Amino acid sequence: MSPSLLVAVAAVLPFLGSLVAIGLPGSARNAAAAVAGGVMLVSLACIASLYPQIGEAGPITWTLDWLPTLGVRFILRLDGLSWLFAMLVLGIGALVVLYARYYMAAADPVPRLFCYFLAFVGAMLGIVLSGNLIQLVVFWELTSVVSFLLIGYWSDNASARDGARMALTITAAGGLCLLVGMVLIGQIVGSYDLETVLASGDTIRTSPLYLPALILVLAGALTKSAQFPFHIWLPRAMAAPTPISAYLHSATMVKAGIFLMIRFWPVLAGTESWYWIVGTAGMATMLVGAWSAIFQHDLKGLLAYSTISHLGLITLLLGLDSPLAVVAAIFHVVNHATFKASLFMAAGIIDHETGTRDMRRLSGLWRAMPYTATLAMVAAAAMAGVPLLNGFLSKEMFLSEAVDNAGDHPLHLALPVLATLASAFTMLYSLRFIRQTFFGPAPHDLPHEPHEPVRWMRIPIEALVLTCIAIGLVPNLTIGPALEGAVRAVLGDRTPDYDLAIWHGFNAPLAMSVVALVGGVVLYFVFGKRINTNPRGGPWLMDRLDGGWLFERAMTGLVRGARWLEARLGTERLQPQLRILFLAALTASLAAGTARGLDLTAPGRMTEFDPAFALMWLVGAACAIGAAERAKYHRLSAAIFVGGAGLVSSLTFLWLSAPDLAVTQILVEIVTTVMLLLGLRWLPKRDQAIAVPASEEARGRRRRLVDLCIAGLVGFGLAGLAYAVMTRPAVDGISRWFVEEAYPQAGGRNVVNVLLVDFRAFDTLGEICVLGVVGLTVFALLRRFRPAPDSLERPAQQVRHDAYDDAREGREPGHTTADALLVPRVVITWLFPFIVLLALHLFLRGHDLPGGGFAAGIAMTVAFMLQYMANGAQWVEERLRIQPISWIGAGLLVAVLAGAGSWLFGRPYLTAFFAYWEPPVLGKVPVASALLFDLGIMVLVVGASALMLVALAHQSLRRTRAAEAEAEARDAAERAAEKEPA
């Protein structure tokens, strides 16, 4: 298998595994874990096997044309940096899968968890492997959406819902900023390919758009990586299951922003703006996170704020304009991922086996859980930067950069002091984590009796802790080669000389490290008791800066502002909305005409006057006016008039040699008119005899007069615009190209159909998606709709028929009505297969003659509609299992897969292919792949239309049920009256 194909397999497998996992039963914990574990291991093997080829001849790429006319390609790009991050994502992910199998309870819907988990893995791989800016943003936002599902996995927990909402709001808003920033970078460079962008650093930094692009890109990176002041979402994301916390906040989601800053460091760094924004944010985040972690009583809360602090440290390193600082940042990304994932897993074991994470209740767990305690203490020591562990090496590099960058700059002057202070705070909360949890008196009043977990649950922690020790003891043999590949992928020729040796002699960084370690111990023994008894569990001096409260206040303000605007500018009635819309369009057109000038008397070619055509349009205009006049009290006649206007439109298309549009229009008019009549049947009745106050009647007349004036102005404006366009010479646009290329490129002579299913297939795909959503929305709304009481009454004709049946012996109510519809019912029933054949005929001929998938779908809907009208909903659904929702899903799936089929031949999505097939009897037959896409359109149109039809038809069943309930209540009352004594 080629290297580029291995990259594609590794990127696609998690999404396929996610689909498999969601299809498993809710109790299939072992099967879901096996699927997730297998996917992770296979993807990990694919990426790991490519290590020897990284850097030999440039990045390994796999390319697929996405939007070629816009210069957008789907590119998977694997270099040293993306290889290192992909290994973290997949390696730690595989360990998290094993850990989650034993952490999650059998009653939990574990397949759903692994479905979300694998989708998140795929999205993270998409970010680190993206070779295109727009593609990167798509995967970026996908991580925000899937992390929302992961954090809110326990949806019955209010804190989980709130944490998920906060995380999605902040990170998704940052993602929108990132999208705009990437578009600006693409405009500056002239390409969205990452390879081209990374080679255009000078062009980007000297562009006038550099500062806006920088701010927007950093907004996305800083929100995702929980940098101050956007850090507030991360502690509240701890409501997620601990395996998810261990994954999201060690190797993946919070590292996405760090990865983005590292990836774009060569082209965005090196300016004062980068230094101040990134350096200041990193410094503030490092100090605020470390200070807040000191006072947390919840184990996961302490680890969350420590994560914020370490992310701030990495961001600060990236803010320094130093290649060595970039080396230290990449190195600490790996170290932080290993010790933080192991600490989260250890905290999860403690919670799992004791029932609490409150350090005020935990103590002396060394006695009951010595093995877990040892692992957790080693990981905490690595977090604190104790020598001979991996955290010590990257901390030494950080302190060395703090000393080397000390200079006249204000931030540089404060660097050594603040770096030492933050390291001391790290030692303080790490020591508190160890001392409060594992030493002291034996715990009491715990929900569970403490004990060691099952053996397999400890294996992931053991692997990570051994990695911390191995990197700390022999860094050049373990992380050295991978780190060098990642650094060279970022810095290229600017890669500095660096040494991962454990001992560099007595120097300033070592002295600062010793001061930080000793200072942290001293601070704990001096202030430890006061910290442990802090009732709030929050940091001193920051008790008023409650991020959750600030976020909720901000969201409340936004909602109130939106409601204020809605109250001032919005309306629940359609008529005022249309009034505003038409006035805005009229104002805009008048402004444009006044500014540019609009000569309606320009000479042009005039067509001959045709009395028949003019008469037809007069009929259509009369129907439109009649519909407007009759709409208030006479809905049936208004609907008939609307249908008449639609019929005139269809005849107009036919008159002007557009038979395809005429066929579609007439079919749509049939369906919409019938559905309109069915819907109007259940609305409350309006009576013209109801007395209206004189003031209301006068106001109504004034409103209608204003509406008439607006409608007249808009109508005359459109008429004038149409006249101006049609009396001028035709513009030589792209229409001629469509006519000339329809057959050579798409194999079809029906230009309209070719345009829909080939040239503009993307538009059509979006439109059928909207149609499916509309059908589902109408169905959902009508499920909760209850007809007005006066509309439940039987029609007068049915009342007369039932009275006739009651007056005659041997007849039941309903017989006369059934007899009256007998002939139409028989005819309509026999028409069903012929209409279906007509629909298939329209479908098969659509590529060359009037017809197509949309027209065929509407024709098929007419077949179902006639059956419902003639025989009733119960009769039809006893004999036909329509299942319109399945039709919608199947149609969308067929359309999407038909477009994806072109990828198998290396062509852009939705690229059509046609050829001639010569069967034995039929002879030469043209066959186009667009036929499959058209089939998806047809099936989805049938499903959406039938779903709305079913929703309307079921209102009659509600009427029947209501009538039956009323009759039963009446019979019960009569029986009760008979039993009463006289």
Image (cartoon, rainbow, N blue to C red):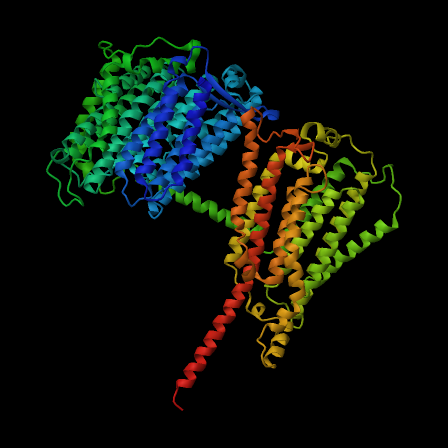
Q: How many labels does the image show?
A: 0
Q: Which of 353 and 982 is in front in this view?
A: 982
Q: Relative to residue 908, is residue 354 drawn left or right?
A: left
Q: Nearer the viewer, residue 112 or 240?
A: 112
Q: Relative to residue 779, is residue 105 drawn left or right?
A: left
Q: Relative to residue 925, is residue 251 drawn left or right?
A: left
Image coordinates for residue 537, horizontal then vertical, percent: 25, 40
Quadrant in the rendering for residue 789? bottom right
User: Which image quarter is the N terminus in?
Assistant: top left
Where 411 sits versus 851, above or below?
above
Where 145 sits versus 83, above or below?
below
Residue farthest to the front, as pictured: 920
Residue farthest to the bottom, as pictured: 982
Image coordinates for residue 70, horizontal then vertical, percent: 60, 26
Q: Nearer the viewer, residue 137 or 387?
A: 137
Where 712 sits versus 151, above or below?
below
Residue farthest to the right, as pictured: 608
User: Which image quarter is the C terminus in?
Assistant: bottom left
Q: Is residue 632 visible?
A: no
Image coordinates for residue 631, horizontal then vertical, percent: 69, 61
Image coordinates for residue 332, horizontal then vertical, percent: 32, 21
